[in-house]
Every structure is written in structure tokens, then in C-alpha cells.
Image (tube, helix red, strand yellow):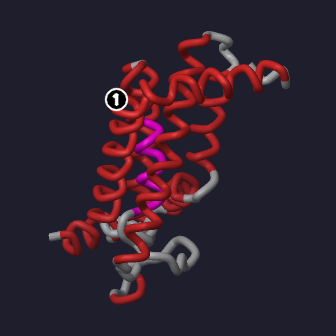
Amino acid sequence: MDYALFRLINGLAGRSPLLDELMRFLATDYMVPTIAMTLVVLLWFSGHVERQRQIFLALLSVVVTNVVVKAMNLVYFRPRPFTDHDVTLLFYHPSDSSFPSNSAASLWSLAWAVWTFDRRLGALFIALAVLMGFSRVYVGVHYPLDIVGGALVGIFSAHWVVRRAAPRLNPLIDRTRRVLRHLALT
């Protein structure tokens, strides 16, 4: 089923130069994450103390997510779709494990953490995560389950940080905010 859905989505590639370019743009490791991080910086500099606390937790959830993905990659390696199949590849050849998608995990972690404190902004971040995930399958570098797996890792990591670890992190957040205030970064 995973491969069949991959074929369906990747089968759209190469039919429309305009759609192909849009998907390449969305699939890069730079564009959507840069947009997301720009939004995070703007939220941080809103000056609202509680918002800064939430952004700190959201960024920490991304760190936790990346540690979990790295640990998973040390245990399990899944080849990229272009390794074993004839695909329409519109992207470079990443050599790391396809599962779980690190980009999906990171973006979903950020999106879910933001969603927990602001549904409207969270919906925007989730839309970015969905678009990037779909585009990564479209351009031929991930299977759909890689994206779903990454999303689940990101969501669970964000939930753990925001709901479980947050109360214990308040002293660290307060110290970090004080240091950043002295550096004129709050």
C-alpha cells in the first residue's frame, strides 16, 4: 500500500513544469523550514512572556524530535524510493535513511507544539508540514509512510515536551529568558 500510494503521488511528477517547480520549492530542506523559523522568530520578538515560553518549548520539541529520529536511524535504515524503484526524481539523492522523514518530524514537532498554544497559528504550521510532506513524496525522496512516521515522531515529541516536561523546564526557560534579555534578544 505504501508503494502504491507513492506511485500514485510520484506519478504526478513530470507532467507539469509549473507544479514540478512548486514541489521542488516546497520539498527543499531550506524553504519551508525557513518560512517556519521566520514565523517562530517573529513570535519570539512579539515580547509577550508567555509566548516566548511557548516558543522555547516548541524549539526544544524540535531538538528532542531530532534526537529521536537520529536514534531510530541508528537502529533502522530504510533505503530511499529511488534506490529500489524507477521513480521520477526531481530532487538530489539524499543518502540518509528514508524512515522516518527528518524534515517531516521536525516540522510536525514545531507545528504540533505551536498548535497546543495557538490553534490558528498551529493550523498554518500544520499546513506547511502537510505541504512539505506531500512534496517530498512527489519529488521522489520519501515514501508516504516515511512522512507519516516522521509526523508521528514529531507529534509525540512535541506532546511530551509541551505537556509532560514543561513544568520541570520552567526554571531553565526563565534563566534562558534572563540571559537573552541581557543580550537584548527578548
The residue tagged with tag 1: helix, strand or loop? Answer: helix
* Residue 108 within the magenta-colored segment of the rendering: yes
Please check the rendered image and state whether residue 78 is part of the magenta-colored stretch, yes or no: no
Pointer 1 local density, CA inside 10 Å: few below 14, some 14–19, many at least 20: few
Q: Quadrant of residue 139?
A: bottom left
Q: Main secondary structure of the magenta part?
A: helix
| Residue sitting at x 29%, y 50% | 152
Q: Is residue 43 visible?
A: no
* Residue situated in front as seen by the camera: 106 or 16: 106
Classify the position of the N terminus by image quarter.
bottom left
Residue under label 1:
163
Q: Which amino acid type is shown beneath numbered disc 1?
A: Arg
Magenta residues span 101-111
Position of residue 67 relative to residue 169, above or below, is: below
Q: In x, y percent, where is residue 177?
A: 68, 22
At 28% from the left edge and 69% from the top edge, which residue is drawn? 6
Q: x and y percent of residue 5 in the render?
A: 22, 66
